[in-house]
Amino acid sequence: GGVVVLNARTGEKYVEISKPAFDPNKKNYKELKKREDAPLLNRATKGLYYPGSTWKTVCSIILSKRQDKAFVCTGNYHIGNNIYRCLYKHGKVNLSSAYSQSCNLYFLERCLSEVSNEEFIRTSQLLMSKKLPDRLSSKDYAFAILGHGPVSVSPLEESLLAASIVNEGRMPTPVSVKSEKTGSREVLSKEVA
């Protein structure tokens, strides 16, 4: 796995850890390249993982521009033959409480009914480097809303997503050493962030 801790304003990386690691002083790169656990892969920046519930941020960004709606979470949600669940019945929730309680069903209901496939993909692509298909099947779309299926991001991208919220919609440019020039780019409006 990998971990990245960065300054949300400047993009300065304080911590970047990738495991399994290797001793760069041993210079046994041929052997390292053959290893199944791929220790030469920097998992902090290149490893791809399902973001899970943190990806509900994408739908939250889109839904925050719309009229808030209440929803009653019953704990189960059916889409065709698939059943999606929450850890418990959240009861009546709105966008804020659904996000803070990580209510899967709220985001499935609202995003599937109000957010087009294209709008979700377009917003997701602002926040990740992996290219999503131009269109997602309904099953993949449901999984993507919950941060699974076709969605995978690096720990660095997760850090940058959080930083762009904290930084009022500006995503910092990650830098490894303080002497590098820092900067940012706007990915969200201040109101949404």
Image (spheres, rainbow, N blue to C red):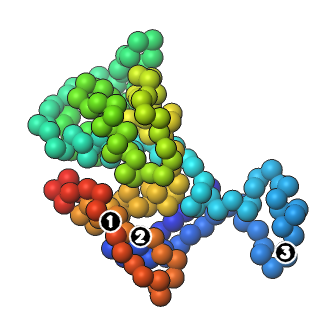
Q: Nearer the viewer, residue 120 or 38?
A: 120
Q: Which mark is residue 173?
A: 2
- Amino acid found under the numbered disc labelled 1: Arg
Residue that lies at the very extreme toward the left in this rendered image? 67
Residue 176 position, x and y percent, is 52, 77
Seen at 25% across and 24% down, the residue is: 113
Mark 1 in CB contact with mark 2 (< 8 angstroms)? yes
Left or right: 67, with 125 as reference point: left
Select label 3 or label 2 by which is in front: 2
**Element marked by disc 2:** loop
- Residue 106 in percent (x, y) is at 28, 31
Give the vertical position of 176 relative to 29 (above or below): below
**Residue beneath disc 1:** 185
Q: Is residue 33 visible?
A: yes
Residue 185 against residue 105 in the figure, above or below: below
Callout 2: few (<14), some (14-19), or many (20+) C-alpha neighbours within 10 Å? Answer: some
Question: Residue 27: which numbered mark, if any?
Answer: 3
**Residue at the image position 76 percent from the left and 68 percent from the top:** 22
Q: At numbered mark 3, what does the secondary structure look like: helix, strand or loop? A: loop
Task: Kindly identify the residue that appears in the image at 39 percent across and 78 percent down.
Answer: 182
Q: Quadrant of residue 159?
A: bottom left
Q: At label 2, which amino acid type do we have?
A: Thr
Q: Position of residue 39 (x, y in %)?
A: 74, 60
